[in-house]
Image (tube, grey):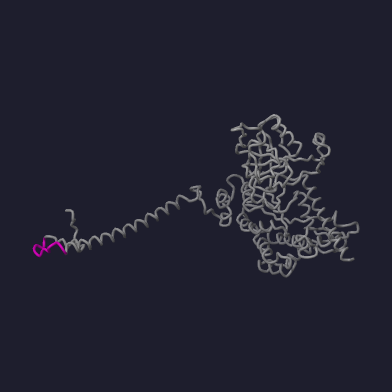
Amino acid sequence: GNRQRKTMTIIHATKVLAAVVLYARIATAQNYRDSSRLQIQVPSSLFKSGGYAHRGARFGAPPYGATIMQPLYYADATLCDANVDKRKGYPTRSTVDGQMEPWPSPFILMMDRGGCSFVQKVRNAQHAGAAGVIIADNSCLCSDEECLNSTDSTISCEENEPMMSDDGSGGDIDIPAFLMFKHDADVIKREVIDNNQFIQVEMAWALPRAEDHVDYEIWTSPSDDISKNFLKNWKSVASKFSDHTNFTPHQYIFSGVKKCVDAQGTNLCGNLCTNNGRYCSLDPDGDTNVGISGADVVVESLRRICTWMHYGSSNTSGEKYWDYISGFMDRCDNPELFSQQSCVDGVFKNVGIDGKIINSCMMDSGGTGAGEKGHNKNILLDKEIVEMEETSVIVVPSIFVNTIFLRGSLTVVNVFNAICAGFLEGNAPELCEACSDCTEKTACLEDGFCASNNSESGGGVSKRFFGFTLLLLCSIFGAIAFVHWKKTREEMRDQVRIILADYMPLNDGDDDDQSPMDFARGGGSASLIG
């Protein structure tokens, strides 16, 4: 009946929007901006001008502004097993007691794609001691005719290289990883297996256009949990960087024009989209019947765009914008209140934002209502989609520093390191100088200074603090010693007084001679020794 048709419509809408997301990611991945470089330095016959084509992992912690140049070892395995045999692989090493020596550290480890997630492979390599990872793809690109001609025709090709995304468990990984295309990976594997060739690999990352100010932009979504955690923790750091950076926040939404709007301008994706299917977002609950809808996410995204326009872009610190984001997450970020205007108004009032200005901005830009079929555009949401396509954003959250996409997990420390690396030498703000080498970096970013080590010592305790502590301890022990000496001296006097009173006769004669009792009374200075 009607209920079944409604259910089928919802399922269809979800599938359609999922196709929109996939289409957008495939389209933008073609020209994705990357700051990394993969090159073979040894042997020179494998050197490629411009480096090797590759994809970087969306997890781990690439050392931006640095280079890893180490020997490459091919594990000859998928590395899905946590018990990695480090005595196998190529090129071969010398043997000891009938066993080949393990890969000598430091090294870059190559393994085959397939069998398990990218995260699991890289984690196992990290535990085995690898400084970096290169995963050899096992499928040709459909556009790579040379690769297709040299590969078994029964193996299907891929239109695009896959994204090395985090499976949700990659927070413990701190080494970088690249995916190398099959055509190139096969050549390298043949060299190390057939010729036992030593190979030196360069993995490099750079932040171009270093200046006295750094530009960075963050693409997030009001419904993304990783975005929420980062924004809440980044708020205090952003204010400390405000005089030295140009920050631009962006909201991640999808255009539904090609997939969610039919020829008559009808919305095919239901409550996943606003404006008759023009602007869409995935349903954060996974259930279009209950909770927060994709349309709710689009409305909140527009609200945040307007909030930044009026209370952030003209203010270097954007304090009220950050206060609104934090306040919304604390008070309204739940299925019951997410789309309630009364909750939003309460946050506006609490942080000092005029809600009328924001509401007018949302309506004047085109609103989020249905309007006339196929003609209800919102200029601010259109602008956001255009910038998303030009910037080639394919994952959320994403951050760009000096126009370069920041790979790895989106943590406060990783973003801080990338921003500091973007400054010209000598122009970095005090926060970079104070916290870059701090052992407790998170606490340093919150406090604005490093309590765990000091620039004077570079260790855990400063020389000044150590000297003060030593002086204090000496004073305490000196005071204790003085009190003990004084008490012992008085006790000795009492004992001498008793001995003299019992065994020494008192002299009642000459007053010029000092009586032994004088000493016992403490009034004399004569020595008992003579």
Q: Is residue 403 visible?
A: no
Q: Residue at x 71, y 34 (%)?
A: 189
Give the residue at the far left of this rendering.
509
Instruction: Give the image location of residue 437, x and y in percent.
Output: 56, 48
Q: Residue at x 71, y 37 (%)?
A: 51
Locate residue 105 relative to residue 366 in the image: left or right: left
Of residues 164 and 53, the one drawn nearer to the viewer in this rendering: 164
Magenta run includes residue 274: no
Rendering quarter of residue 147: top right
Q: Main secondary structure of the magenta part?
A: loop
Of residues 112 and 242, the one drawn nearer to the viewer in this rendering: 112
Q: Is residue 474 visible?
A: yes
Q: Residue at x 67, y 54 (%)?
A: 247
Q: Is residue 201 above or below residue 362?
A: above
Instruction: Give the image location of residue 264, x and y in percent.
Output: 91, 59
The segment highlighted magenta reads 502-512
Locate residue 518 relative to residue 38 in the image: left or right: left
